[in-house]
Every structure is written in C-alpha cells, then in structure tokens.
Image: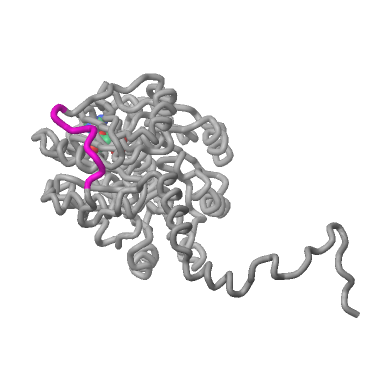
Amino acid sequence: MPFSQFGLEPEILLAVQKAGYVRPTPVQTAAIPKVMLGQDLIGIAQTGTGKTAAFVLPMLHRLSLAQRAGRMGKFRVLILAPTRELAVQIMENIGTYGQHLPIRVAAVFGGVDEAAQIKTLRKGVHIVVATPGRLMALLEKQSLDFSGLDLLVLDEADRMLHMGFLPDIEKIVEGLPRQRQTLMFSATLSKEIESLARRFQREPKMVQIGKRANPADTVEQCVYEVAAHLKNKLLLELLQHPKWQRVLVFVRMKDGADRLTEYLRSSRVRVAKLHSSRSQEQRTHALQDFKDGKIQVLVATDIVARGIDIDGVTHVVNFDFPVNPEDYIHRIGRTGRAEASGDAVSLVPPHDLNLLTHLEFFIGRRLVRKRLKGFNYNAPIPPTLPGEKPAKRDWRKRTREREQKKQETPSKTSAKVKAHHPAKKKLGPPRPQGKKPPRPA
Ligand code: AMP
C-alpha cells in the first residue's frame, strides 16, 4: 500500500519520498486517514514505528489546504512533548516532512533564551512544539494567542498526563478553543491514563498496533544478574565487544550518571552524560556527539527514554533497573527502531530482582538470563575508584560497629550531656506516679 493512497498533498508525498519511505508503517496506515478526517484519536504503537509521521503528515496536509484556501491566519497547531530533546526532534521531523510547504514552526522549551522564543512567536508561526513548563511561562506573559488553534497533539501522552505534568496540561488545555481536534500518541498507555486522556477529547477513535505493553519485536532482551558493586566492571567488559558500538546507558539518578561517566572515562571509554542538571548546550552537545558517533556511550537518565530517535543505537543498557515497567519499554525502544535490530541488556542486582519479576509479569514473559564468560561474579567489593562513592556496606553491620564503638569510647557530646544532666539518682526521690506537682502560685 503506497503513501499516495491517503490523498496527501503532492509536496508532502515528495518529502516522504525524499526521506526514503516506501510504504507507511501500520500505525501510519491506521492513523493518517482518521487524522485527515479531523477525528480525535488515541494512537498506541510500539516505540520507533513511525508515530511522529502518523500525526505530522496529515497535520501538514490540513495546514496546506487551509493555506491554499486563504484560511491560515494565526497559529493553528500545538504539539506538547515531555522533554526538550523530543520537542526539537519533532520540530526537525516537521522540517523534513514540510520542506516543500511554506509553513512556519517554532519550538518553545526551557534552558534557552526566552526572549528569542518570544520574538519568533511574534513574527507568526503556524505550529508550536513545546514542553509544558516554558509554555506556561510564556502564557503567563501573554506571549501566545491560542484563539486560532484547531489541533492539539500530546506526544508521549502517558508521560504528559502523569502527575507531575498534569496540572500544567490542564491549565494549558483550559485556555484552548473547545472546537479543536486532539490527538494523543504513546507506546504505553494504561487504562487509567486512557480514561484521563478522554477528558481532553471528544469521542476519540482508537488505533492500537500490537499489545499495549509490548517492546518492539526487533529488540533482543536479556538480563545479567550481578552484584551491585560489579555492575561498573561488567559494563566495562561488555563494552569491549566490537558489536557494542553505540550504547545508551540508563541510570536512575543524576549523581549516578555523573559517577558512572567518570568511571568509564577514567577507563578510556568515549562517553558523555545527559541529565536535567546539565545546561541545554551541554545536553544538545552530548546528544549530537552520540548521534554523530563521536562517542561510544551516552549515560543518561530517563529524560532520553521517550521518543528520542537516534539512528543505529546498537545497545540499550539498564544500568539501574527502571522502577516502572512503562519506563523499561520506552528505554529499550531507543534501539531496534524503524525495523533495525538492537539489544537491550539489563544489569540486575539481587535487590532489584523484584522489579524484574514485576516487569516480566507486565510483558508476559521471562527474559533470557546471560552470564559473561570469564567474568568473576564473586569478586569482593573493590577499592574505591576515582569518581566513585565508596560502596555501601551492609547497614546492619555498620550499625553494629557504630554501637560497639560508642560503648568503647563515649563521645564528647555524650560526656557533655552527662555533665548537664547528672545521673537520675542524684536528682532526689522520684515523683509520685499519676499526680502532677502543684503549680507555683
Ligand atoms: P518515530 O516512531 O516517529 O520516532 O519514527 C522512528 C523512525 O522510523 C524514524 O527514524 C523515522 O524516520 C522512521 N520512519 C517513519 N516512518 C517511516 C516509514 N513509513 N518508512 C520507513 N521509515 C519510517
């Protein structure tokens, strides 16, 4: 089935052809006609299966028709995305698919100069791709006029409707015209989030490709069960394999990303890090270096877990196992994109095995366990390496040691306390139970 079946504008077909797409993906086949008809839609499809084009192509088609009919006017489309990187990527996709159309698009996100964004908006744009935080700030300054809007898209809808973002989304949507089309796309969407999504839509059509919680079939998944203190070393050894060329490593916390990056760098791995405490410039730089193949490894928190499309990621590593199964699906979806193959490797220490079991229940199958040949899984806790925090020891042992030390050498503070509060027997006879002493008159 070719793209021409949709009746898209010739300029869009030309751009699609230039992008090298031969036929639409299943989510595109199902969603494009519905979006062209102006219907509200919830689209669920695996990561990397062409969801962006599924809403951008019909959106451009409708804008182009409006423009030809002289009905273009003020800005018409708002696309909300959870991260700056994803907003930029969507904007780039619009640039690619709309390269033969006179359509102006702007991105609005934090971490960069606000004044420049306001200036671009004032010049007039047709599409705004935004993250909720900066958009709210601009709305408060009344730098945006929504009155002409007729299409709202929530990309990574489940993330957008999560608690952290929800109040902002509600406020933004409140200020939009009621007569509009609303589209929601995601790879994962729980029933609860779906019912929440419906609050913003009118009788949405549902497009669901594959099972709701399935990772893409093109991703090989496996697990290495390994002690927490050996994860660094195991990762370093795995990285030596020539197939591990472009590796995206996910960690849970920002300081974990800093420490792991330091460790890998000191072991001569070409590595960069990406998390929310880095400047926008550093974030863009790290992502670009990774895309250009200048570095082998990008260590990141979940801010790159969603939607980001990087060509040729050979491996995704869950260095820290994700707490939510949905995050696992999105993380590993950074590889095996557009039908390429990829590997997802999880390093799971004993204390995270419960999370693994929960995930396996969620996806309905057990993941393959692997062991790296020649790796010493019983190695003792190594001495602290540069950039590493000392490994945590058993807290019971630590408490016992502390107690023992206290008994052997009373601390200065406890000596001072004793001086202020001499032993009880020196205070005189105990107060009679149950009766308070009379108050002084
Ligand atoms: P997305 O899920 O939108 O992030 O897209 C994932 C990747 O698939 C991107 O690299 C797109 O360029 C690519 N893609 C999207 N649609 C098609 C198509 N119909 N044929 C081939 N590749 C596509």
Q: Is residue 343 magenta?
A: no
Q: Residue at x 45, y 50 (%)?
A: 399
Q: Nearer the viewer, residue 250 or 173?
A: 250
**Image-based side of 141 in relation to 393, left or right:** right
Q: Nearer the viewer, residue 237 or 53?
A: 237
Q: Residue at x 22, y 30 (%)?
A: 343
* Above-or-below relation of 420 to 227: below
Q: Nearer the viewer, residue 256 or 31?
A: 256
**Image-based side of 19 in relation to 187, left or right:** left
Q: Quadrant of ligand 1?
A: top left
Residue 425 horizontal/vertical position (percent):
70, 65
Residue 58 visible in the picture: no
Residue 232 horizontal/vertical position (percent):
23, 43
Residue 236 horizontal/vertical position (percent):
17, 41
User: Could you tell me which quadrant the C terminus lies in?
Assistant: bottom right
Query: What segment carries the magenta color?
Result: 373-382
Q: Residue 430: which quarter of the image?
A: bottom right
Q: Residue at x 41, y 20 (%)?
A: 364
Residue, far left: 242
- Looking at the picture, the colour scheme in use is one colour
Magenta: main secondary structure equals loop
Q: Is residue 379 magenta?
A: yes
Residue 142 visible in the picture: yes
